[in-house]
Amino acid sequence: MSLKLKTILGVALIEALLLAVLIGLTMDYLRSTNYDGLYKRASTTATLFASTTKDAVLSFDLASLESFTSELIQSPDILYVRILSAEGDMFAQAGEQAYLERIFSEDKDVSLVEDGVFDIQASIREGGELYGIVQLGLDTAGLNRQIDQAWQWSAVIAMGEMVLVALFSFILGSYLTSQLGKLHQAVNEISKGKTGVEVKVSGNDEIADVAKAFNKMSDRLKQASDHRDQYEQELHRLNHSLEEKVHDRTRQLSLNLQQLKQTNAELKQTQTHLVQSEKMASIGTLAAGVAHEINNPVGFVMSNVSTLVQYIDVYDGAVDRLEKIQQAEDLSAKEALLQELEIWLTQQDIRFIREDTASLLADTQEGTERIKDIVAGLKEFSHVDQDKTFKPANLNAAIEQTLKVAVKYSAEVITKLESIPDVLCDIGQIRQVLLNLIINAGHAVGDDGKILIRTGVQENMVFVSITDNGCGIKPSLQKKIFDPFFTTKEPGKGTGLGLAIAYGIMEEHKGTIELQSQPGKGTRFILRLPKSEVSDKTIPSED
């Protein structure tokens, strides 16, 4: 099959499919919107007519009922109308006799009407009791004729467009195959070893651009052939001087190594000052976390209050309408205002407002209690001894206090704290270690992970285990994790001193910090501090 035929058939097929889909969707939309409009008009007409004739039915005013039916039958698309009593007796009717003699069968869907008449009825009720029935029929033949005419016009337009597209595809295919034939002939000549081949360029379209590019390629191939020998000679000369360059590079690397050793010595001298800076950064992180945690409940409390103000406006509007109903003098005016109130309440979605109000108040109370807990935890966390002396302290309490003020994430934090003895420590430094490990775990797991914190006793040591199910740490990096200035975070987001400081604090307390990590499964840090009482408990598995 030639490219020309493929182009014609491809474009025609795509156009046919698009037109078929477009016409189908358009006709379905036209039918559904017109049928829905007719159904809504019929339902509204029947309901309004039932409301209009209710007083006449209740008072058995047959003259008024005849007048009402005569006026309604004047509508061009209403074929008949009748008013019946609750027992089925005829009060009044109007319309062509053929439609009035038909057995009434109410239609539920306009698209299912086969006799050209959409039959619908509405009840006349007062106080929940049925007093009469309104029946009427609307003409659907005219609507169906309009839809059929639209379908015919759509088919004619589609056929015309298909012919134009086929003609355009034929012209385009002829042009493409002609230009591509010239390129094919030139390529064959180059494949046989001929250089300097050129293709005649005509026009300013993409095919002409391809021909120009081909000519440039042919010229470059000729130039490449001319320069090949020159490049080979240059390569030979470069190989001859390669050993000399390698020798010079080795000497330069040796000098760089000496400079690196000197720089490393200077960095080690500066490490002590940076450790103190990292401690100050932890305090800044703590303050930022508290501000973030307070801003979150404050934000949704303010949002809830704003929504509740809008709901109060709806309640005020309902009270105003109820006052108008109470002030109305006659029954018909009250009924009209009541119907208006029901419609208005439905538009405002009063049921949702009532349910959402209770939820908003509960969320607001929860938010204020959260702010209270954060402030209380911060006050308790700030009471740190400044004399650098070791005192008995409980690690469970330290964990709970740290969690109250640590930076929170969407991850789930689970605590399983066993009954443990006090340890002799500087509780402020221990909290700094816990804060650093919890923040790192939060960064590792993101929004959907879990952080498990457990405590217990193993032999003569009290342990704290902090486990996350994040991305884990590669084995090649685990040996460096406690090195100063080593970090796996992005530049500017970590100093690399947090875990190094934690390691030094644990050594100062005659304790240990251990890393266990598997890439793709998570990371676990275990803190161990000596206790006075010996126990045979072991660290349970977090699997």
Image (tube, rainbow, N blue to C red):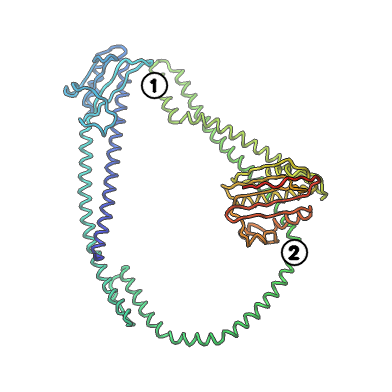
Q: Is residue 165 left or right of residue 416?
A: left
Q: Are marks 1 and 2 in contact (CB under 8 Å)?
A: no
In which quadrant of the rendered image does the N terminus lie?
bottom left
**Separation (CA) of disc 1 from disc 2:** 85 Å
Look at the picture and state if 210 lies above or below 20.
below
| Residue at x 77%, y 43% (from the top left corner) | 421
Q: Secondary structure at mark 2?
A: helix
The 10 Å Cα crowd at callout 2, few under 14, some 14 to 19, many 20 or more, is few
For the point 22% across and 58% down, the residue is: 166
Q: Quadrant of residue 55?
A: top left
Q: Residue 444's x, y, as percent?
A: 61, 52
Helix, strand or loop status at disc 1? helix
Closer to the observer: label 1 or label 2?
A: 2
Which residue has dot 2 on it? 270
Q: Is residue 440 above or below residue 36?
A: below
Disc on res. 336: 1
Q: Nearer the viewer, residue 468 or 516?
A: 516
